[in-house]
Image: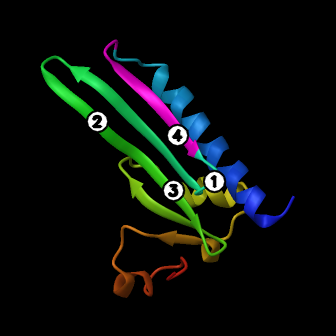
């Protein structure tokens, strides 16, 4: 399996596992949505629906694959994704924390871009 396919499979596995955990404690009016766009290499996990009178449309995770790297665009959890991805054979140098400003990325163990 080439690296791109490995990255795709790893992200999908991670999101599917997290979605399964999330749905074990469901809210009846909130739906968990997995979005896999392999043509554009965008992968998201959303919760969508209603909590009482409040509209819910919330991005839990958002990953992009660009230039051979996994870009973590959003992580609205306390999960340390780097550990999960490292266990799947992905190095920190293959992960870009996209929600950190480029000047801050240089001070982490992850890729700058």
Q: Position of residue 20 (x, y in %)?
A: 56, 27
Question: Which callout, 3 or 1, points at the residue further toward the start of the chain?
Answer: 1
Q: Which residue is mark 1?
A: 39
Q: Secondary structure at mark 1?
A: loop
Residue furthest left in the image: 53
- Determine crowd level at label 4: few under 14, some 14-19, many 20+ residues with C-alpha closer than 10 A: some
Q: Position of residue 25 (x, y in %)?
A: 42, 19
Q: Which residue is mark 3?
A: 63
- Determine crowd level at label 2: few under 14, some 14-19, many 20+ residues with C-alpha closer than 10 A: few
- Determine crowd level at label 1: few under 14, some 14-19, many 20+ residues with C-alpha closer than 10 A: few
**Which of the numbered marks, if any, corresponds to residue 57?**
2
Residue furthest right in the image: 1
Q: Which residue is mark 4?
A: 35
Q: Is residue 69 above or below residue 85?
A: below
Q: Secondary structure at mark 2?
A: strand
Observer able to see residue 7: yes
Q: Residue at x 33, y 78 (%)?
A: 101
Q: Nearer the viewer, mark 3 or mark 1?
A: 1
């Amino acid at each position: 399996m080439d690296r791109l396919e490995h990255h795709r499979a790893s992200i999908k596995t991670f999101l599917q596992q997290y979605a399964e955990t999330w749905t074990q404690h469901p809210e009846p009016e909130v739906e968990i949505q997995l979005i896999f766009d392999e043509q554009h290499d965008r992968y998201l996990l959303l919760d969508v629906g209603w909590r009482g009178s409040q509209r819910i449309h919330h991005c839990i995770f958002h990953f992009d694959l660009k230039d051979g790297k996994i870009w973590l665009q959003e992580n609205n959890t306390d999960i340390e994704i780097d550990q999960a991805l490292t266990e799947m054979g992905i190095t920190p140098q293959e992960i870009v924390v996209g929600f950190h400003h480029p000047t801050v990325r240089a001070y982490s163990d992850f890729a700058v871009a």
